Amino acid sequence: MTAGQPRTHVLTGAGSGIGAELAARLQARGDQLWLLARSEERAVELAGQFAGARTLVADLADPGGLESALEAGLAAGRLPERVDSLVHAAGVVDLAPVTSFDRQAWQQQLDVNLTAPALLTRALLPALRAAGGTVVFVNSGAGLSASPTWSGYAASKFGLRALADALRGEERPQGVRVTTVYPGRTATPMQQKVHAQEGKEYDASDWIEVGTVAATILHVLDLPRDATIPDVQVSPGP
């Protein structure tokens, strides 16, 4: 990449939370955004929210549909030929004890949080290799330790960690860097939902700000080529 040239970033989860904050910061510095949208209506909303961004319509909760959309996009040349970063920031959570979890909710967590990142990464690897790009998996503290009622979400995030670790070793010779970011509880709409499921009062000021996590990801993306950050944890302050 030529110095000063805008970079190309593909993001999931740009509609809210950490993904939206990161997309805004990348756009503000003049970089090109490609955003995943689950529907045509959502694509229009994202295009309005991030002027100049390109969108790809594909539902992360539908692995077969996602795979077909990616294959069609590649065949038609509708995906970027060079990708400087692929950031997996989308995620879903549904808390329940093992004795009473809902099978569909369990499967959706696996599809969105694990299978979709794997399929999207596989499809964009040639473009990432061409740019010497970086893959960032926004994981969770639940990807390191599973608490009661978190089995489905934690299983998907433990799997995401395994995906990142394997990919890192496979792609190092190709010049692609892979980082997993493990944010602790962050003030996002997802965190608000978690509190509701836990039956707790939600106060955003108790938790990490989305800008803090976005700044961490930007640091990873801007790291000089002589180094890599395989894993980084972001925890709430004292």
Image: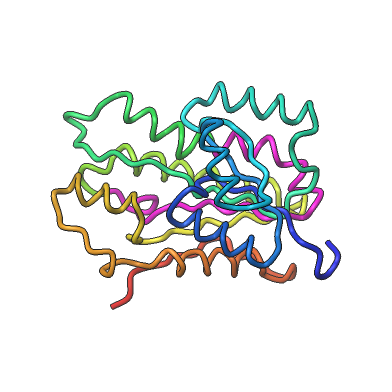
Q: Main secondary structure of the magenta part?
A: helix
Going 73% across and 49% down the picture, which residue do you hit? 83
Q: Is residue 66 visible?
A: yes
Q: How is the image coloured?
A: rainbow
- Farthest bottom residue in view: 238
- Farthest front residue in view: 48
Q: In the rendered structure, does residue 120 fall within the stretch colored magenta?
A: yes
Residue 233's place in the image compared with 59, above or below, is below
Going 57% across and 47% down the picture, which residue do you hit? 48
Residue 19's place in the image compared with 66, above or below, is below
Q: In the rendered structure, does residue 44 fall within the stretch colored magenta?
A: no
Spot occupied by residue 236 in the image (x, y as percentages of width and height): 33, 70
Say which of 93 and 46 sits in front: 46
Spot occupied by residue 84 in the image (x, y as percentages of width and height): 72, 55
Spot occupied by residue 65 in the image (x, y as percentages of width and height): 56, 22
- Farthest right residue in view: 2
Going 49% across and 53% down the picture, which residue do you hit? 138
Quadrant of the snapshot with the N terminus: bottom right
Would you say 213 lies left or right of 198 here? Answer: right
Q: How many marks?
A: 0
Say which of 86 and 36 sits in front: 36
Would you say 205 lies left or right of 109 here? Answer: left
The image quadrant that residue 132 belongs to is bottom right
Residue 62's place in the image compared with 179, above or below, is above
Say which of 147 and 44 sits in front: 44
Would you say 83 lies left or right of 104 here? Answer: right
Q: Which residues are magenta?
A: 117-146
Spot occupied by residue 54 in the image (x, y as percentages of width and height): 67, 44
Going 45% across and 69% down the picture, which residue do you hit? 212
Q: Is residue 165 visible?
A: no
Quadrant of the snapshot with the C terminus: bottom left
